[in-house]
Amino acid sequence: MYVAFASQDQIHIDAHFGWCPFLEIYKVSTEGHELHQSIAFPPGAEQDGDENKLTPRINAVRACTLVYVTAIGGSAAARLIRERITPIRNPNPSEPIESLLDRLVVMLQGTPPPWLRKVLQAQQVT
């Protein structure tokens, strides 16, 4: 599965989805994880209510199953969910992407928690 992380520094999960300067997209499996793509967005998308800033970000994560953010607006979350992409709020902006990736691999190797099983099952249906 592909997992995206909204980041300001390409190391931490420390950005709001609509304002993130980077989306780091990783391929994650029971075997491990690897960076698939790093996408940079031009500055200037900081204004609330600017729905145009969402389209390139949503297009960038279309192949993803999960998107980790520190925050996300209601309209962006709804658009992701319609695309069968699950936004997940990570409240710890100091957490490195690498740390969460390692935990995801362990979850996939064992018995994933119910929320992740549900997401993975929904992905298989499509």
Image: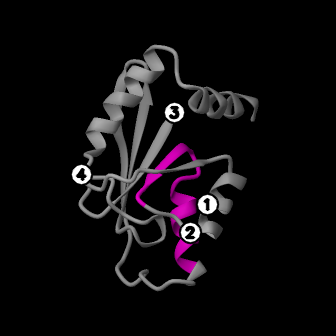
Q: Position of residue 78 (x, y in %)?
A: 68, 61
> Three-letter amino acid code at disc 4?
Ile
Of pointers 3 and 2, the one earlier in the residue sequence:
3
Q: In this picture, which residue range is highlighted in magenta?
A: 52-70
- Which quadrant: the C terminus? top right
Q: Name the residue under label 3.
A: 1
Contact, mark 1 vs mark 4 (Cβ under 8 Å): no
Gap between marks 1 and 4 measured at Cα: 23 Å
Label 3 CA crowd tier, 10 Å (few <14, some 14–19, many 20+): some
In front: label 3 or label 4: 4
Please provide percent x and percent y for residue 50: 55, 84
Give yes or no for residue 58 being in the magenta stretch.
Answer: yes
Judging by the rendered image, the residue that carries numbered circle 4 is 11
Mark 1, residue position? 77
Circle 3 or circle 1, nearest the eye: 1
Q: Which residue lies furthest to the front in this view?
A: 91
Between disc 3 and disc 2, the foreground one is 2
Residue at image point 67% right, 53% down: 81
Q: Closer to the N terminus: mark 4 or mark 2? A: 4
Kindly identify the amino acid type of the residue bearing the numbered disc 2: Gly
Q: In this view, does 98 lie above or below 124?
A: below
Q: What element carries label 4?
A: loop
Distance from label 3 to label 4 (Cα)? 20 Å
